[in-house]
């Protein structure tokens, strides 16, 4: 049974059409071409799994690099600290040249449509609008394709601040 015959079994018996009786080299080879196409598409599945594993490893490396840079920026920079900061900066530049982008969201406004994972909503009397207070894990992009979603803590205005604003 040809591939056209198989398609016809989906239809009601009254609507089935007999497979055409084509002649010519192009039509004789159609089944062979379809079989070759099916074989070339099958090996793509394991490559996708390998890509996911590579993306996860890249995201983890970029996250640890980002955390180390933040820790060094918070502490005193002595001789070893400056040297480590230089190594980290060089590593970050190499990853950026390879198409890896790490995005920090600290201080950015937050709205419900953002593509980030909110870990905690923290009330803050100084906040006038929902703002990302801290990025726990950054968003990581590989050639503009997100391979890791950011995890953030969001500061929300306290209820008393909202009431004061609404009465003013």
Image (cartoon, grey):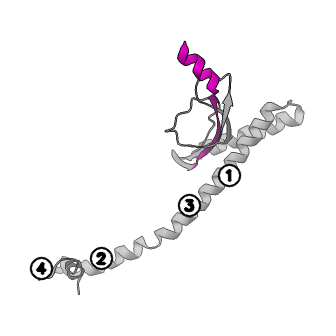
54, 166: nearer the viewer: 166
The answer to the question of whether label 3 and label 2 lie on touching residues, with beta carbons closer than 8 A, is: no
Residue behind mark 3: 51
Inter-mark Cα distance, 1 to 4: 56 Å
Q: Quadrant of residue 133?
A: top right
Inter-mark Cα distance, 4 to 2: 23 Å
Inter-mark Cα distance, 1 to 2: 42 Å
152, 165: nearer the viewer: 165
Residue behind mark 4: 17
Tell which tag, 4 or 2, sits nearer the viewer: 4
Earlier-in-chain disc, 4 versus 2:
4
Earlier-in-chain disc, 1 versus 3:
3
Magenta span = 148-168
**Residue at (30% x, 76% y) in the render:** 34
**Residue at (85% x, 35% y) in the render:** 81
Earlier-in-chain disc, 1 versus 4:
4
The answer to the question of whether label 4 and label 3 lie on touching residues, with beta carbons closer than 8 A, is: no
Position of 57 with respect to 167 (left or right) is: right
Identify the secondary structure beneath mark 2: helix
Tell which tag, 1 or 4, sits nearer the viewer: 4
Inter-mark Cα distance, 1 to 3: 14 Å
Earlier-in-chain disc, 4 versus 3:
4
Inter-mark Cα distance, 4 to 3: 43 Å
Give the class, few, some or many, for how many residues have Cα within 10 Å of label 1's Cα (few <14, many ≥20).
some
Was residue 149 drawn as part of the magenta stretch in this picture?
yes
Give the class, few, some or many, for how many residues have Cα within 10 Å of label 3's Cα (few <14, many ≥20).
few
Residue behind mark 1: 60
Where residue 95 appears, as percent x and y from the top left, is 64, 45
Position of 78 with respect to 26 (left or right) is: right
């Amino acid at each position: 049974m040809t591939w056209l015959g198989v398609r016809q079994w989906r239809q009601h018996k009254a609507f089935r059409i007999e497979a055409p009786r084509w002649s010519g080299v192009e039509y004789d080879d159609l089944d062979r071409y379809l079989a070759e196409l099916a074989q070339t598409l099958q090996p793509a599945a394991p490559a996708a799994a390998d890509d996911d594993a590579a993306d996860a490893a890249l995201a983890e490396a970029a996250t640890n690099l980002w955390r180390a840079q933040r820790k060094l920026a918070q502490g005193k920079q002595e001789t070893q600290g400056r040297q480590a900061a230089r190594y980290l900066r060089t590593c970050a530049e190499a990853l950026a040249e390879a198409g890896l982008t790490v995005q920090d969201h600290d201080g950015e406004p937050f709205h419900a449509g953002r593509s980030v994972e909110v870990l905690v909503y923290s009330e803050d009397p100084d906040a006038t609008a929902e703002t990302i207070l801290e990025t726990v894990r950054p968003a990581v992009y590989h050639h503009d394709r997100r391979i890791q979603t950011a995890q953030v803590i969001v500061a929300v205005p306290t209820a008393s601040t909202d009431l004061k604003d609404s009465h003013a």
